[in-house]
Image (cartoon, rainbow, N blue to C red):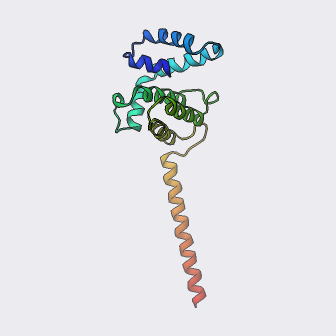
């Protein structure tokens, strides 16, 4: 997150990101060599999908133009959305990605950052559904609703007929 924050703050020059990452690994990550591959995958994934991620942020938080979101919150959202939408869900399950992003926002962002991050990521999660689960499409949902409506109408008619017979 620190590296994404710096990269964004410095104007998103793609050639500067590797330098920022290496400096931050040395400064903040000594002894975490086994995590460097994960860090590199996350950052390159965010950068490769930046336009898609930004478009999703704009749709999920239409009242907040991307440049009006604080740099910290942007970095957290971008990481969280990358994990949620493009990441390996066996490595980081979606709900874990959301919770981690919320905790980062609470630790490094402003007073309302945790709620904001939760709102945006929660909206996206609800829109896409839980990865790995089968969700019906719109046509299937409409058919199911129609079948339920017909069933309720049939049950209502049966009840009316029974009441009519019992009153005779």
On the rendered structure, is 162 left or right of 43? right
Q: Nearer the viewer, residue 108 or 34?
A: 108
The image quarter in which residue 41 lies: top right
Residue 126, image x and y in percent?
50, 42
The image quarter in which residue 95 lies: top right
Q: Residue at x 44, y 17 (%)?
A: 6
Q: Residue at x 50, y 59 (%)?
A: 146
Looking at the picture, does residue 4 appear above or below residue 105?
above
Residue 16, image x and y in percent?
43, 10
Residue 136, image x and y in percent?
54, 46
On the rendered structure, is 63 left or right of 25? left
Direction bottom: furthest residue = 168
Assign the C terminus to one quadrant of the image: bottom right
Q: Residue at x 34, y 30 (%)?
A: 68
Looking at the picture, does residue 91 appear above or below residue 3?
below
What is the count of numbered marks?
0
Residue 93, image x and y in percent?
61, 33
Looking at the picture, does residue 34 appear above or below residue 121?
above
Q: Nearer the viewer, residue 84 or 102?
A: 102
């Amino acid at each position: 997150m620190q590296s994404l924050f710096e990269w964004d703050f410095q104007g998103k020059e793609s050639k500067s990101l590797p330098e920022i990452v290496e400096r931050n690994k040395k400064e903040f990550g000594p002894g975490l060599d086994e995590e460097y591959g994960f860090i590199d995958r996350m950052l390159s994934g965010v950068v490769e999908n930046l336009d898609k991620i930004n478009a999703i942020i704009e749709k999920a938080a239409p009242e907040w133009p991307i440049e009006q979101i604080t740099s910290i919150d942007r970095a957290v959202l971008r990481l969280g959305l990358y994990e949620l939408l493009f990441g390996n869900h066996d490595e980081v399950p979606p709900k874990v990605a959301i919770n981690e992003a919320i905790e980062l926002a609470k630790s490094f962002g402003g007073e309302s950052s945790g709620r904001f991050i939760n709102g945006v990521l929660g909206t996206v999660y609800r829109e896409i559904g839980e990865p790995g689960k089968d969700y019906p499409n719109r046509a299937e949902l409409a058919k199911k609703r129609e079948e339920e409506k017909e069933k309720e109408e049939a049950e209502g008619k049966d009840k009316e007929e029974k009441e009519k017979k019992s009153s005779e």
